[in-house]
Image (tube, rainbow, N blue to C red):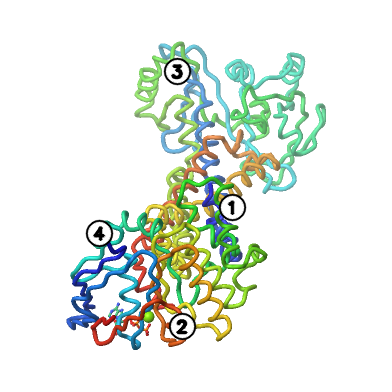
Amino acid sequence: MALLEIRSLSKVYQRDSQAIPVFENIDLDIDTGEFLVLMGPSGSGKTTLLNLIAGLDEPTTGAIIVGGEEVTAMSRRQLAAWRSDHVGFIFQLYNLLPVLTAYQNVELPLLLTHLSKKERREHVMTALDVVGLSDRADHFPRQLSGGQEQRVAIGRAIVSDPTLILADEPTGDLDAKSADEILTLMQRLNREFDKTILLVTHDQRAAERGEAIMHLDKGVLTR
Amino acid sequence: MKYARLVWVNLTRNKRRTILTTLSVAAALFLFVSLRSVVTALEDAGDVGSETRMITRNAISIVFVLPEAYYNRLVAVPGVKSVTWAAWFGGVYRDPRDWFASLAIKADSYLPMYPEFIMPDEQREAFMAERTAAIVGSGLMERFGWRLGQTVNLRSTIFAPDQEWPFTIRAVYEPSEPAVGDEWFFFHWEYLYENTGGRMTPGWYVLQIEDPALAASVARAVDEQFENSRARTRTETERAFQTSFLTMWGNVGVLVNVIGMAVFFAILLVAANAMIMAARERAAEVAVLKTLGFGDRLLFVLVLVEAAAITVGGGLLGVFGAKLFFDGTEFQGAGFLPGFEVKWATIAIGMGIAVALGLVAGLVPAWQATRLPVAGTLRRVA
Ligand SMILES: Nc1ncnc2c1ncn2[C@@H]1O[C@H](COP(=O)(O)OP(=O)(O)OP(=O)(O)O)[C@@H](O)[C@H]1O
Ligand SMILES: [Mg+2]
């Protein structure tokens, strides 16, 4: 059985009296441990799809089922708890909290758990070790390079050991070398830690790191 | 507790705004506590008046006098044990702005009726034996640096303002409790009477009654008796009299409450504005926290706690600042507010207001944080 099942999913934005359809009746299955890449022109609805999967936005029609739980049927409260347990989100612009250190940023998702301070520390240091930034734990985001910031963000996304990692153009703002490091890191997460990853990118070279590439264009998803 | 850091970094990220907001809350609560303490001091002064003493005064106003001849008729009223009288002197020592209360009293009957002015027997006897002698409160002695036995010259703002009145301090009293006041100045009625050419008549009479329960009937009997006289009277218990005297220049309590409310709402706007601005700047971060799984309730509480931290901090500063200030300066309203102090009840009210202020000020931004749409907010900043 697939980890993620998307069934006849449609999203139509309503601006004033005008309906703006993004996609209609999309179906998609992702298996556990898959590393899928999603490509498509700007405005085709890639971010919209990720937001729907993460429960950050509501579909117009259709259902999303992750690990047997129907995300699209959950209340706001259930969604928040579900996200904290199952989703790691990585953004193009890292979105770290500037007033917190790398350590504290990575610790954020763990504040929502029942872990003790000591246990949180172990998890955070492990995550920072995986992304290769143990020595930067006390640095603030402004003291880090873009690539390092993104690695902290990845540490934050994996620290609570989520079922699914969603990455929206994680290398879009990085130079080639940093982008390469990030992609290698994501590949490791997939191979060594068996993480299921859905990566959105415009970059053909980035796309080649995945196991399969999907295209979203004019509301149609092809695999 | 694990969220404390999150609140703390948000408080300290715009230090100037946090400090200014905290200080404005502190200033407002300092003002509130000061005004509130004025009211409690006035209320206490009203409570000091005895229940078995009644004041008969001119029905028109305390500043009009009463005929001397009323004395005999007052003594004859059933239920009245004894009668004495007094008058304002309006004494001034050197600087007219340095106000204190000075009274001419019919000492042989007045002092036995007022046991709350405590002084040694030999001083009382020395006072009684000398026509120009005075009894002075210990606080007033200290204020002017006077000594027992010293002769001091006062002027009267009421009688012959150019004339100097020498008084010899023969007794120093201590009040039985702070609200009685330790800054009164008493001297013999006879001294005033003779120096005003015998024209002077009592400012008010004090009646000692046998039983507080008789107060209403005595008041009616007295006031009916003088109903058709040239000077109609108004008789009430001393407690009621104190209260009406202290509120002579308008209803202080109401005034204070109105000012308090105005200050509260002004500060509410200041604090709420600061919080809303802070929350707006952080919209993207709130969206990120939601992505991480932070729930609406948690975000709501975090914003409220942040707002309350500012107002409680300002509250502590203002409320205890006022306490320390007034304790340190031994403020007594230049003698007008004997027993003035910042009471613990006032401190509790002040801190209660500070907490309420924070919760109300944080309500709007807290609610906004929970309603914030994640997808739309992240799209706008990205
Ligand atoms: N809140 C909204 N209201 C109306 N239209 C919206 C809204 N959000 C997104 N859209 C539209 O939906 C479409 C898909 O947007 P989306 O951001 O998902 O595209 P994308 O594939 O991620 O693009 P890019 O590659 O540029 O990031 C766009 O045409 C966009 O203008
Ligand atoms: Mg996008």
Q: Amino acid at mark 4?
A: Glu
Expressed as whole percent of the image width and height from the top left, the position of residue A188 reads 51, 69
How far apart are labels 3 and 4 at the CA level? 96 Å
Q: Amino acid at mark 2?
A: Ala
In this rendering, position of residue A113 left or right of residue B41: left
Mark 3 vs mark 2, foreground winner is 2
Please report, as a chain letter, where disc 3 is located: B
Q: Is label 1 on the same chain as label 2?
A: yes
Residue at coordinates 48% horizontally, 41% vertically from top-left? B248
Please report, as a chain letter, where disc 4 is located: A
| Ligand 2 quadrant assignment | bottom left
Q: Which mark is residue A121?
A: 1
Q: Is label 1 on the same chain as label 3?
A: no
Residue contact at pointers 4 and 1, CB within 8 angstroms: no
Mark 4 / mark 2, whichever is N-terminal: 4
User: Mark 2 highlights which residue?
Assistant: A206
Mark 1 vs mark 2, foreground winner is 2
Q: Is label 3 on the same chain as label 4?
A: no
**How many C-alpha atoms fall within 10 Å of the one at disc 1: few (<14), some, or many (≥20)?**
some
User: Mark 3 highlights which residue?
Assistant: B73
Residue at coordinates 23% horizontally, 59% vertically from top-left? A73
| Badge 2 residue CB within 8 Å of ligand 1 | no
The local secondary structure at tag 3 comes to: helix
**How many C-alpha atoms fall within 10 Å of the one at disc 3: few (<14), some, or many (≥20)?**
few
The local secondary structure at tag 1 comes to: helix
Mark 1 vs mark 3, foreground winner is 1
User: Mark 4 highlights which residue?
Assistant: A70
How far apart are labels 3 and 2 at the CA level? 112 Å
Q: Amino acid at mark 3?
A: Arg
